Amino acid sequence: MTLLRISDLKTQFPTPDGIVRAVDTIDLSIGERETLGLIGETGCGKTVLGLTLMRLLQSSTKTEGTIIYKGTNLLKISEAEMRRIRGEEIAMILQNPTTSLNPVMRVGGQIAEAIRLHQGLSKRDAKEKAIEMLDAVRIPSPSIRVNEYPHEFSGGMKQRVMIAMGLACNPSLIIADEPTKGLDVTIKSQIMKLLKEVTEERAMLIITHDLGVARELCDRIALMYAGELVEYATTGEIFEDPLHPYTRGFLGSLPSNGLVPIPGMSPSLINLPDGCRFHPRCGHATELCRRKHPDMIEIEDGHFVRCFHA
Amino acid sequence: MIEGRKILGSIGLGILTIFVIVAVFAPYIAPHDPHQMYRPMEHPSSSHLLGTNDIGNDILSEIVYGTRVSLFIAFVVSVISMLVGTSLGLVAGYFDKVGFLIMRVVDVVLTIPRLPLIIVIASFIRPSIWNLIALFLIFGWTMPARIIRSEVLTLRRRYYIDATKMIGGSDFYILWRHILPNVIPLVVVQFIMEAIHVILAESGLCFLGLGDPVAMSWGMVFHYAFECPIIYVSDVWMWWMLPPGLCIVFTVLGLTFVGYALEETFNPKLKNPFGGMER
């Protein structure tokens, strides 16, 4: 069952220097209880894609295409209907847990507010639920912690609180933006364990540039480069049989694979190169790559790649 | 330094508490009815601790009742200014288009020199405390509106605002639950600044004879004392002019001390001896 289907999605920001094509013609789908990893370098449009799904970009942004969630096009419904979907149906866990909590509000209050906004529970019931949520994300002595302020929590615990906020209304889809950013190794593995439990019951879109996280949690992986998808396959195939030179470069840059960086820089999203967007950095680029923009092709069943030479 | 602030804050709070008690319980504290006439120009004695004025009113009682008028005007103006200024500041900071309009109005009002205009208008309208309050209100809302707006401009880009949107919070919900609590410290400081300003401005207007002759505030006591030529040639000024003047000075000092102490509570950067960085 497909929960979310994105087709031909484009997100563009008009700026004085030109149009930033942050998300360019993306097709993706997420099934129920499926975990999809969206991987790419900084600035390739991963977070923008997440925010587009939540419809939380500034009003000057141009969005085209369709986002079908449970049969409704999220780009066509009213703001009030979208607010009902946010939190209740789709929740997003932001990066930077340290700054994503309001410093003057008790942690419990911030978890409870999602519940109160959507389920109209009384203050006391919502607080009970908040304690339950804190317990679910393994925060010790939740009934005491619920009354504390964010500065009394460590970074890892704040990330847990963010996850608790996201889970509070039991949404069907969670978008986790860099859920392990800025966490040390032990905390990271704890958060991963928690996320793994979370993914068992619902669909999740994990936005990350950490392949280790993706390998651990995701069923399928989509690689994004300069606003478009370049490879899309199951996690196993991405790691065992990567087809796109960018995917290979990405895997090769892992410390365990020799820490070989991809030469060059990712292009500006205003001035994209002609032809294949990756060709200036690609070792296999030919004349064809310089002239023609490759389409996404299905090499094997369910393994898509955007390369002439795959 | 931190201890110093705390001590000053307590002193300020003490001073203000005394004045507020005097204002609230004026009928019980004042030894006489301030409108009752006794023998004029009496020197201080056990029955008239600060003597009587040129028409025979007990000066101490006048000052005690004057506390009521002075503090009442300052309180009402500050509260309404903060309510209006904060609401407009919140809206202006959060919604760009409306904010632009509100801020242009603020700019215009702020360019007008405040005290001279108040003096000019006050000399044309019927002097009454409600007119004075209305006059101060014309200007009172602008500074809080501008300061709150500039804070909201940075607050609305914090990640926790995004996080609230992610769980389906509406704009007004975010303003009320997340942004307002963050600007309350600023509002309190602005409240104190406004109260200081109003007490001084009101005294000034009264001193110039533009106050309400029926509502005898500290400034009015001062004004009548100044109008009476005897004060220049005798000791009368010591119990007629000095006490209301000192009341004004101490109220302003009390407010300033409290503001100074609160500044430190609200600005944690002052707490850290190494300059402090936000984590």
Image (spheres, rainbow, N blue to C red):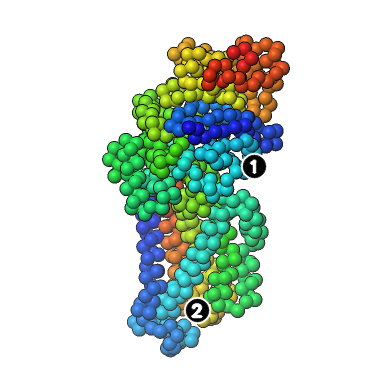
The amino acid type found where label 1 is placed reads Ser
The amino acid type found where label 2 is placed reads Ala
User: Residue A60 — which label?
Assistant: 1
The subunit carrying tag 1 is A
x, y percent for residue A164: 39, 39
Q: Nearer the viewer, residue A40 or A240?
A: A240
User: Residue B31 — which label?
Assistant: none
Q: Which SS class for mark 2?
A: loop
Marker count (numbered): 2
Q: Is residue B141 above or below residue A158?
A: below
Tell me, yes or no, whether dots 1 and 2 are on the same chain: no
Can residue A176 be spotted in the picture? no
Q: In the image as oriented, which residue stretches furthest toward the front?
A: A1
Q: Quadrant of residue A299?
A: top right
Q: Residue at x 63, y 18 (%)?
A: A278
x, y percent for residue A179: 44, 31
The residue under label 2 is B215
